[in-house]
Amino acid sequence: MCVPTERQYLSFRICSEACDQREVRATIEVRAEDEIFREHFPEQPILPGAFMASLAIDIVMRSFAPGLESPVRIEQISFSRPVRPGDRLLFFARQVEPAADPGKFAFVICNPTLVSCRGKVTFADAGDRP
């Protein structure tokens, strides 16, 4: 069963669905007038990679680990296509190995059919933190 939610992340609108306790899907509306585009290359605006990573972490945390404050580590991340003002993004995340490592998630951000960003993030539960 999927549970839909809708919220704002800065000025971006995120509609997400957490499914089966192991998977989340979301659409992200990238507002063309967002201030971030005025600062990140005014002549050829693109969404910063660090911002894409923070979006992914935020969606996964809210869906699967609401009690955590931050990820332990981003194990892998790659950027293959820029995100431009006004784009509509599709986001997918899934637990990599639910039994062996329940805090590890792989994610993909597409724009809309071509991959813009992909990576893996690992969270520790509160008992594992220093």
Image (cartoon, grey):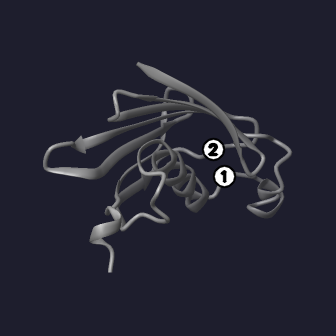
Q: Determine the residue positioned at 83% across, 56% down.
A: 35
| Residue bearing mark 1 | 47
In the depicted view, which residue is nearer to us: 47 or 98?
98
* Quarter containing the N terminus: top left
| Residue bearing mark 2 | 83
Q: Is 79 on the left or on the right of 73, as rendered? A: right
Q: Determine the residue positioned at 29% across, 41% down.
A: 95
Q: Residue furthest bottom?
A: 130
Q: Determine the residue positioned at 77% across, 57% down.
A: 36
Q: Is residue 120 above or below residue 86?
A: below
Look at the numbered discs 2 and 1 and tell me whether their residues touch, using CB distance below 8 Å: yes
* Alpha carbons under labels 2 and 1: distance apart: 5 Å
Provide residue 67's location: percent of width, then percent of height. 46, 57
Provide residue 3's location: percent of width, then percent of height. 50, 25
In the depicted view, which residue is nearer to us: 126 or 84?
126
Q: Is residue 92 above or below residue 11?
A: above
Provide residue 86's location: percent of width, then percent of height. 75, 36
Q: Is 122 on the left or on the right of 35, as rendered? A: left
Mark 2 or mark 1: whose residue is earlier in sequence: 1
The three-letter amino acid code for the residue at tag 1 is Leu
Give the image quarter of residue 83: top right
Determine which of the numbered discs, if any, sits on residue 71 in the image. Answer: none
Provide residue 60's location: percent of width, then percent of height. 46, 46
